[in-house]
Image (spheres, helix red, strand yellow):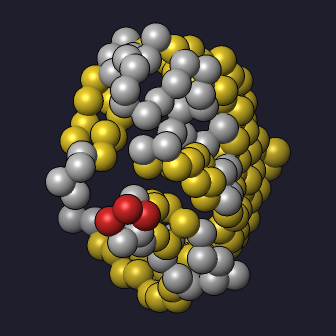
Amino acid sequence: KGVHLVLPLTCGLSGIVNDGDITGKGADLETLAEPTPAWQFNLSLAYNQNHLRDVKSGRGFVAGQRLPDAPEKNASLGGQYNFPLTREWKGYVRGDFIYVGDVLQQFDTVTLKDGGYGQTNARVGFLRDKLEVDLYGENLTDRRGISVTSSPAFGGYQTLIRPRELGVELRYEF
């Protein structure tokens, strides 16, 4: 009840209003499998249909419309292999794929659709007692997925997901 919606104002600013209700239906599946101590797998799937209902008139939204800024489909898949290196050191290799479905953006009477995107990440880690050293890569395919779109009436810009990132991470617990 009273879902928050962005309402563009004629002065160039926008506000957030509690306006209308939503009806939602969907299904989620999450699973984690560890067939052996060395192997771990995870899978997450989500499908959600959220539509506006009982929307106040004059705000640019209509009953039955898909909820803006909310993807209908999301998924992730990952796997990890753990292995010993020496008596003191252990290691692991991990890969993940994340999918975010398309999102509708509403600006007055203009509706834009930001396409979905996938992101592939990988990590190799080495652990000893409280020390961990990781080599990682995020967004390995350098996909330029759109995470936010602003109103075209005010210049319109898009914020993209982070570009490919390669790095080393050092952690110590104390």
Percent x, y of residue 43: 73, 44
Residue 110 or residue 157, whichever sits in front: 110
Residue visible at 41% across and 81% down in the picture: 169
Viewer-closest of 42 and 37: 42
| Residue at (37, 62) in percent of width and height | 153
Quadrant position of the N terminus in the picture: top left
Quadrant where the image shows the C terminus: bottom left
Asked if 64 appears above or below 115 in the picture, the reply is above
- Relative placement, left or right, of 169 versus 113 is left
In the image shown, does 80 or 68 lie closer to the viewer? 68
Please say whether residue 166 is visible from this viewpoint: yes
Residue 59 in the image: above or below residue 39: above
At which x and y percent is residue 28? 68, 28
Q: Is residue 113 left or right of residue 135?
A: right
Which residue lies most toward the right here?
35
Residue located 32% across and 65% down the image: 154
Q: Quadrant of residue 113?
A: bottom right
Residue at left offset 45%, top offset 87%: 168
Rendering coords of residue 90 (x, y %): 58, 73
Residue 78 image-quadrant placement: bottom right
Instruction: Return the x and y of residue 96 as percentages of the image width and height.
Output: 68, 63
Q: How many labels does the image show?
A: 0
Q: Can residue 122 be seen in this view?
A: no
Q: Nearer the viewer, residue 141 or 68?
A: 68
